[in-house]
Image: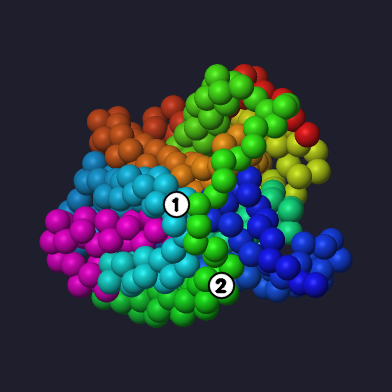
Amino acid sequence: MNKPVVVSEETLTEPVVVEDASPALQASVAGPAYVVLIGISFSHFLNDTMQSLIASVYPILKDNYALDFAQIGLITLAFQFTASLLQPLVGHFTDKKAQPFSLAIGMSSTFFGLLLLSIAHQYAVILIAAALIGLGSAVFHPESARIARLASGGRYGFAQSVFQLGGSFGTSMGPVLAALIVVPFGQPSIAWFSSIAFLAIVVLWRIGQWYKPQIKAKKLAAVERRSDALNPRSVAIAIVVLVVLLLSKQLYVSSLSSYYIFYLIDRFGVSTQAAQLYLFVFLAANAIGAFFGGPLGDRFGRKIVIWFSIVGALPFTLALPYVGLEASAVLTVFIGLIISSTTSSIIVFAQELVPHRFGMISGVFFGVAFGVGGLGAAALGKLADHTSIAFVYQICSFLPAIGLLAVFLPKMPK
């Protein structure tokens, strides 16, 4: 007899009902689960393509409205701050009551934010538009991460990597689309990207229809504590260390995403379009590294992958401020591949530490990534105004060394 059972109690506070818990049937439904996983990754691609467009049009906004680097940083802050502030709150709320159609509704905020950005002629309006796009991100990430894990078939690192892959490639597409569309046609052409937001709304609505029947609205019984589980103090220390690791990684990536174009223009005299293509090279490498990091964590352990990303990336980041244009492009490829491989491992590591607060912990870590990027961009912009872009990159080259704090991460029980 087919009998409803509750699965994923350790990761979902809203139980998921499936038709049968037998291993054979679970294997047979892997196809539909992976279809959903691809769909949520594609939605992540669309979401982050629109988000990355903001940083990619900074040179246009800077020239059109005579903005300084501090004002550019505040645009990033307005975008990142709404995402950072709201993501943990959204995750906490959906831990208590899952909202299958919240993803499509949240994407509507991004839709209107893009339209507003295309017609904004005042600095305050630009900030509001950036904040609306950030709001869409805040709603998207916690619940979509939950759906990615639900569709994983137990391969949590792989699922997180597929999910991250969509976002990373979306981030890398922003500079290319800006170079091909926004630079030639100007700020009003940003409105064309609202069609991407509309497509994302349609896809996310369909995913919500798949997700809704699987939600059983009743309170979940308390998660039974395992005999080999870590004590609360060890969990708290590990969470703090993971937050700091993600902080150092994201701050470095944010420095390249926000100011690498200006660095190349200032130091090597390249054109804006050429600089955007160099940025695309780094972001594409970042996407590839993010994909392979999760499966490697599943196979060899997440702590090993975290250590590799720290030790492996540091020599390249230290060399970057002192090499020529071609060497810079090569180094950013290695940096992107290595430093991004740790993202999935950090997030899954944290989810396994606090399995009964999956939505909230996902929101906290995605929120920290966005928030640190915004605060860091604003601070680095201010520093660049008082010194130089080249000096900023010399300082940032040491950021991956903070990752040596990984020595304090505990060994997770099997």
Q: Position of residue 68 (x, y in %)?
A: 22, 46
Give the number of callouts: 2
Q: Which residues are magenta?
A: 115-141
State the residue lying farthest toward the front.
Answer: 1
In this picture, is 149 found above or below 223? below
**Contact, CB < 8 Å: mark 1 with mark 2?**
no
Give the number of the disc on residue 96.
Answer: 1
* Label 2 neighbour load within 10 Å: few <14, some 14-19, many 20+: few
How far across and down, in percent of the image, does residue 187 sit?
A: 27, 70
Can you say whether 22 is above or below 206 in the image? above
Relative to 268, is 403 above or below? above
For residue 179, side relative to residue 85 (left or right)? right
**Residue at the image position 17 percent from the left and 54 percent from the top:** 66
Q: Quadrant of the N terminus?
A: bottom right
Query: Which residue type carries mark 1?
Result: Lys
Disc 2 marks a residue whose amino acid type is: Pro
Residue at image point 63% right, 70% down: 36
Which disc number belongs to residue 114?
none
Residue 115 showing in the rendered view: yes
Q: Look at the image and tell me whether residue 269 can be seen.
A: no
Pick whichever, 141 or 115, lies toward us.
141
Name the residue: 70% across, 37% down.
Answer: 302
What residue would you read off at disc 2? 213
Which residue lies at the image location 60% right of the left edge and 40% below the top edge? 223
Q: Main secondary structure of the magenta part?
A: helix
User: In the rendered image of this protein, does residue 300 appear above or below residue 218?
Assistant: above
Q: How far, Cα to Cα, is label 1 from label 2?
A: 17 Å
Residue 152 among magenta residues? no
For this orientation, the residue located farthest to the right is 24
Q: Earlier in the sequence, mark 1 or mark 2?
A: 1
